[in-house]
Image (tube, rainbow, N blue to C red):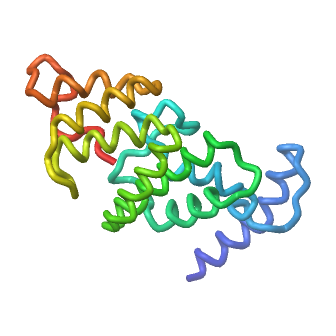
Amino acid sequence: MIRRAVAVALLAFAAPAAWAAAGAPFDGRPLVASIDPGALCDRLAAYAPDPEATAPPVPGAYVSAPRAREACTDAATLSGASASDRRRWLFQLARAHYRLGEFDTAYALLERSAEAGSPGAWFVLGRLFQHGDGVRVDHTVALLHYLEAWRRGAPAGLVAAPAIYGDPDSPADAPARHRA
């Protein structure tokens, strides 16, 4: 308990010094509160095969789903955001809902994001149909989704397409390494 109090006190004194060293005025608010929701959403839920990702990818098992859901919901409702930002945040919001086990909501958000043009959403929809994850297994639909992901700029779509029919030379034939 005493160690925690000492750590909090040190942080209280160190934060203004860190802000001053960075050349930014310290306004007394916690650092996390000053992060915009879009940047936080990107940091918490970026996806490796998504060419629109603006942050390092977060593997599915490491997505902090409750925090990502909150940040991505806030980001997706920002006024003045570009269409590409909004579709990326919707896609990442779908990842958070998927990790929370809210599959119907995740699927609906994936469809909205894909309709808006998200290559990552097209790719994940292909994965869902290929593996029957919450939907029926349909290899034709999966192939079409992968090809659309590739057409929209996600090379992973073209890499994953041969795996549908069991191409042993396809690196995408490895079990679900790109799952949401």
Residue 57 is drawn in which quadrant? top left
The furthest residue to the bottom: 1
Q: Looking at the image, is 32 positioned above or below residue 156?
A: below
Place residue 23 in its image quadrant: top right
Q: Give the residue displayed 60% in from the left and 81% down from the top.
A: 2
Q: Position of residue 91 (x, y in %)?
A: 47, 49
Q: Nearer the viewer, residue 31 or 102?
A: 102
Which residue is situated farthest in the top direction here?
A: 169
Q: Which one is in front, 179 or 31?
A: 179
Q: Nearer the viewer, residue 176 or 135?
A: 135
Q: Residue at x 17, y 20 (%)?
A: 170
What residue appears at the point 84 percent right and 54 percent down from the top-left corner?
Answer: 17
| Left or right, 29 with reference to 5 | right
Where is residue 50? Give x, y as percent.
45, 35
Q: Is residue 162 left or right of residue 157?
A: left
Above or below 13: residue 154: above
In this figure, what is the number of numbered marks?
Answer: 0
Percent coordinates x, y for residue 13 in the rendering: 80, 65
Q: Quadrant of residue 37?
A: bottom right
Name which residue lies at 13% across and 17% down. 169
Quarter in which the N terminus is drawn: bottom right
Q: Tell me: 136 left or right of 90.
A: left
Q: Is residue 149 left or right of residue 137?
A: right
**Residue 160, x across and y down, in percent:** 25, 28
